[in-house]
Amino acid sequence: MYLKIKDSLQFYKLDNGIYHVYDPTSMKHFRIGEQEVKWLKLLNGKNSEEFLKKHIPEEFFEKFINQVKQLGLLERQKVKKKFDLFKIKFTVLSVNDLLNKLGKFPYIFRKFLKYFSGIFLFINFIFIALNFNNIRDILNNFHFDLSIIFFYLISVLTIGFLHEFSHALVAKSYGVNVPNIGMMLFYLHPAFYADISGINLLNNKKARVSTLLSGILINNILLSMSVLSYHFLKDNHPNLSLYIIYFSIINLIMIFINIIPFVEFDGYYILINLFDEINFKYNSIIQFKTFMKLKSLRGIKLEYLLYYVISNMMGLSMIWLAIIAIKNYVSDIFQFIYLDYFFILLIILVTIYFYYIRNRRIT
């Protein structure tokens, strides 16, 4: 038996002899002791079973090897990934080395968000109230064209990257290693993501919630910067101020989406951390299936049923809005008699696939 752990495994030393182990192939995080790390590194593909048993106590050997296999940490162990059209991810940037070079900046950044976010929120309320009529007129005269689409994509990706980098900075301030930042197509919307799942290794609930909130807080700051810019530029630079308002609206939408707990954005993960229930979505699906089978509310938790219904409505709404936006853009370019029927069929097929994916997650 010549076992070999994956070359891609990453080891980060924490305090008190504890290591954070990250497996990029499965995007899973583990927290193990220094002794277990030494045993793992013995699995280099060259050491025989007899050699391993001399260095790993016999009473732990079988259990340790079985656990390594179950976690999928060995080479040539295929980790089966279920394809999900609504959550397609790929890595863009490895940021942990960069974060390590920033020294105390992540800590300073976290404190800045903590003490100044309330001020920025106050600024937003004041300046939005002062300019409410102008903003309403701009939105009423909104026209959908190619320049707006281009500006929207650039803004979403810029705001999204800053949002995720904020997560990464705050996670790092708590000693969590962030392996990468990537891009994804989430419910047919382009977005960035930061792999901060290592915060699950933190025992401090407040630290986990603080990390999850940091993205929303940076959106709050970007919104303040844009509403202030609009207030002082609207008279002399009307064209520029128009795009500043669009930038502000995109930030507002991202704040709203990330606050609500019914889609797997920040709000959902904040919810499950606050209530210490990691399997909330899974349990809501199980409860709904039980309700449909028994046709009775006996033994059913109503909060799960409510969550299941609202989360499905939110997920589908995001998908339908994305399809309608694509349809509006395509119809401006191509005049095709069956275009409406095509997109109606597309919505039906995507809806069926959506429920197929939801059901598959519990199998």
Image: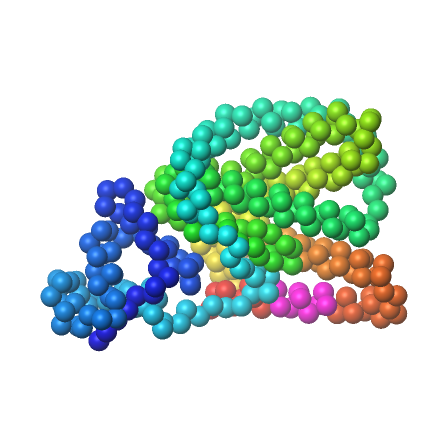
Q: Position of residue 281 (x, y in %)?
A: 50, 55
Image point 19% across, 70% down: which residue? Answer: 47
224 left or right, relative to 146: left
7 left or right, relative to 109: left
Image point 53% across, 45% down: which residue? Answer: 164
Q: Position of residue 318 (x, y in %)?
A: 67, 54
Q: Position of residue 305 (x, y in %)?
A: 55, 54
Farthest residue, direction bottom:
1
- Colour scheme of the picture: rainbow
- The answer to whether residue 338 is seen in the rendering is yes
- The answer to whether residue 208 is seen in the rendering is no
Q: Position of residue 76 (x, y in %)?
A: 36, 73
Residue range in magenta is: 346-354
Looking at the image, residue 187 lies above or below residue 111? below
Image quarter for residue 4? bottom left
Asked if residue 120 lies in the magenta stretch, the reply is no
How many discs mark residues in the rendered view?
Answer: 0
Image quarter for residue 56? bottom left
Question: Viewer-proximal residue, 159 or 272?
Answer: 159
Image point 24% across, 61% down: which residue? Answer: 41
35 left or right, relative to 80: left
Image point 24% across, 56% down: which residue? Answer: 37
352 left or right, relative to 10: right
- Prevailing secondary structure class for the magenta stretch in the rendered image: helix
Q: Quadrant of the N terminus?
A: bottom left
Asked if residue 351 lies in the magenta stretch, the reply is yes
Looking at the image, residue 308 lies above or below residue 344? above
